Amino acid sequence: MAGFIMTLDSDDDAPRSPSPPPARSSSSKRQPTSAPAPAPPAQPAKPKKLTKKQRQKQKRTDVGLAAQDAESEREDEETTARGGADVGKMDKGFVFDGFGGGFVGRERNNVWDSGEAYIQKRPNAMPRVTVDEIIARRAPEREAALAAAEAQALLDESDGLGGSDDEDEDGEELGDDELEAEMIRELENGELDFEGIDEDSDEEGAEGADSEDEDGEAESYEEKADEETVAPKAPAKKAASAADVENDEENWLGIGQKSDAEDDEEDDEEQDAEEDAEMTAAPSGFAALADVNESDLSDASDAEAEAAAAGTSAADAALAKSFFTSHRNTSTLPSKKPLSFTSLPSCTLSRQLLLALQSLNLSTPTPIQAECIPLAMLGKDIVASSATGSGKTVAFWVGVLERLLHRDRKNPMTRVVVMTPTRELAVQVHGVGMALARYTDVTFCLCVGGLSLKVQEAELKQRPDVVVSTPGRLIDHVRNTPCFSMDGVEVLVLDEADRMLEEGFRDELEEIIGAAPRSRQTLLFSATVTESVQSLTRLSMNKPVRVKIDEMGAAAKGLDQEFLRVRGDKAGESIELNSRSGERHREALLIALCTRSFSTGRTIIFFRSKAQAHRMKILFTLFGQGLERSDELHGDLTQEQRLRSLKRFRDGDVGFLLATDLASRGLDIKGIENVINYEMPKSIEIYLHRVGRTARAGRKGRALTLVGESDRKLVKLAMKHAPPESIKQRTIPTDVVASVSKQLRALDGEVKAVVQEEREEKEIRRGNMEIQKASNLLEHEAEIKSRPARTWFQTQSEKNAAKKLGKDEHNSKFPEKQKKRAFEEDEEPLSKPPKRMPFSGLSRREKRRKMAMREEEEDRETGAAREVASSVRAAKKASMPRKITAARPERPAGEGGSQHKKKKKEKVSIFDREMGVAGGNGPSDKRPGKREREMAKGGADGKGAKQKLGRMGPKPKRR
Ligand SMILES: Nc1ncnc2c1ncn2[C@@H]1O[C@H](COP(=O)(O)OP(=O)(O)OP(=O)(O)O)[C@@H](O)[C@H]1O
């Protein structure tokens, strides 16, 4: 991680006036203090000899003046810059006065880099080979293959066989080309969705770089697109359906259409007929969204959907009334003059914090800040929500830090815990806190998974005032780090609170709440705070104040939302219904978009699964044309890789970040201009958080979502809270997608080869790890064994169950068909039926039975190995010191068996025993089994029996 630079305490724009010491991470005396600006050479009129003390005083004054001058100059520059067009407007008259969109950048501190100090240093660890490296490694091979293919094509052409692909290629190739040709035919016939570009996308089309020739070809695409829009190429017999599709395309978002009662009546019959047709014949797919009001989305279901999205019901509303302390936003009243951080109502911020805010170019509080800071300083519990990018992080930090400035310094302990759902967000929040506390003596520790436990333990020993953490690592420290406890916690902050209250975090949250004192202050922040009081009651809050700035479901003000409709490969078929070909089309669409309309600026692309994001990274790199400037961000990477990806994206080294929902919440990266959703998540919350990565802090941004038929409800919800002019429909020219699709198909072999190499690399790495582990164990056995085992509050199965629950909850927000769509790396030709899993289609019971049988078979096969293992176990047990107990009378032979046997023996009546009956309930004289006979032979102490048992091999599994 040599690339990481700690610039947190760089003094680039820190005021040079005398200031309190900078905030530090508890172990980090590592931060150098701000260097004073060089003093200008003093030119006294009459040189006069000064004493040492006077000289020092003079120097200090000069430095102070110089710093003040520099500061005021900088302020002038900033004021000019702020007047520029870059400053966006927020509702309720608020205008972001800073540059916004990131505490990172030229003049800001790289708050993200605060995680660098915690990166785990494993000198012996084998480095992971990235996709880029593998593809670079394979470059010569690939070039050779391409050259060979070209030569072959030339040869074929000269032989007169090259005219038709269908005739001259071998079987496999022919199949692919046939499919390709068919697809192009369908596209041309209007059966597929990729229609001509519309007016909205003209501009972008012109900007876009093309696949082969950056300028010329892009223009020609555009021309074609225009032609297609005006007069779509379609065979005569298809003309009618193509026109239908065209109409459908034109109004499917319903922009500018009103659901008037009159129109309703007129349209009703038509719609009914359409709906019927949709239900019976091949559905026309994505019926115009303009009709959504009248068709399947009735007002009632609308309200339902919204209530579901907001998590509310009438009962909830009543409960909420009694649960919350009523609060009226005062800072957003129309009559109210714009506030500043120095004139917040009923609170005065300390100088240190004001200086820090100023150094971050923050002078006017956003509405959420103006409301929450005074309440937080009063020690109130808060449940706060406002749109993405509206400054919630500063809103909680300022109040918390202000309270900390009045702490009892003689009694150091962790008083504030801030929790976030993801590690990256924790790094960011920690960085912002450090930046705001730079002129205070407040100490911090970042405790997140994937980063060094040792560094964290060392810092926790120093009793930092603030711990920023993810839930899992926090619990780990509470249980296993002796010097850390949550007994002194006075403030608990849950950032992205609604996510933290989801099932996946439920148990962990309960554990943390249980560990913190009841008297603490609890602050909950999110753009989509849950309205369900039920889940909030779990946090045992004390009459919280509900601060709500924006409507639930509202996206950031400067956001343009575009939707690109995706259909399946047959007319009217939704993309979800034919997964594999559907996936191919989406891939082609995405690549076409990224090479044309989204080729400039920074774009974050969201995928539902890690596999999808990774596959797309391979495709992007192989496809080239600017797409190789991309990185992936998901849970399959190491923490170091994750942070590095973010850094490269932030610094503009890569233009595309291919991410999972890991990056959907909270991340504040300056300069993200575009967000693309590879598919629509099935919840408005996830959608809002994803698209909220752009258009932050009053800036402009663009979000594009590929939508299928089943996404209609959500598209409508997204449209509901957005101004109509911010909603756009995008289409891509048919031939562009077809051409991309063809190129992607040509890459299939290479993709497989890369995946194979990755697999091999992984195996090698795993093998090396095992060797490393074994040699560590041999070398440091005593030390390793003497370490106390780390404990966890759940058993492994409980942990797995909780994990699964969380996953299920997240997945439930995607359509059923998409859930199964996880792309298989070893993809089969489209014509083949999907691969069936073993035992798929069987009932659960039958499946279990079959699995048990298979296990048994395996057991039998590996019987020899098991026998050895169990003999070793038995020998070990035998060599263990025995418990010293009072001597027992020797049992008669055959009675020293297992617990199970003992129980059986207990049932034998005294009468039977005296009569010498071997066992059983009656005098039936059941013949002793093989085990009993072995035991009887083994002697009274049972030792021999155990050894024999080992030799006998594993006990057969119960059916
Ligand atoms: N008072 C302010 N004036 C100007 N810019 C601000 C102000 N407060 C915060 N910002 C800027 O707003 C950006 C977004 O802030 P922040 O990350 O806190 O948003 P958020 O509301 O937490 O978003 P999300 O819901 O996505 O987590 C930051 O980059 C910051 O620079």
Image (spheres, rainbow, N blue to C red):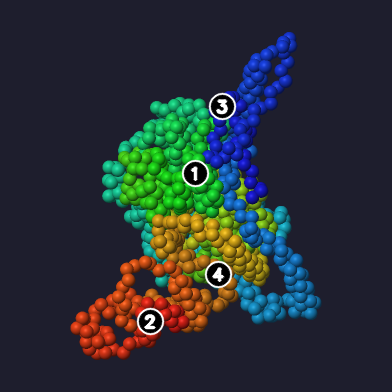
Whole-angstrom CA distance, mark 3 to mark 2, is: 83 Å
Q: Nearer the viewer, mark 1 or mark 4?
A: 1
Q: Quarter holding the C terminus?
A: bottom left
Q: Nearer the viewer, mark 4 or mark 2?
A: 2
* Secondary structure state at the residue bearing disc 1: helix
Q: Nearer the viewer, residue 782 or 536?
A: 782
Sequence-earlier tag: 3 or 4: 3
The amino acid on which the numbered mark 3 sits, given as a three-letter code, is Ser
For mark 2, does the 10 Å Cα neighbourhood hold few (<14), some (14 to 19), or many (20 or more) residues?
A: some
Sequence-earlier tag: 4 or 2: 4
Picture residue at 59% right of the left edge, 70% below the top: 183
Q: Which residue is mark 2?
A: 939
Say which quarter of the image contains residue 683: bottom left
Residue 943 x/y as whole percent: 41, 77
Question: Mark 1 near mark 2, Cβ–Cβ under 8 Å?
Answer: no
User: Can you say whether 533 is above or below 329 in the image?
Assistant: below
Indicate yes or no: mark 1 CB to ligand 1 under 8 Å.
Answer: no
Say which quarter of the image contains residue 763: bottom right
Q: Nearer the viewer, residue 952 or 918?
A: 918
Q: Which residue is mark 4?
A: 824
Q: Is residue 528 visible?
A: no
Whole-angstrom CA distance, mark 4 to mark 2, is: 57 Å
Picture residue at 52% right of the left edge, 66% below the top: 822
Q: In the image, 441: left or right of 127?
A: left
The amino acid on which the numbered mark 4 sits, given as a three-letter code, is Glu
Q: Nearer the viewer, mark 1 or mark 2?
A: 2
Whole-angstrom CA distance, mark 3 to mark 4, is: 58 Å
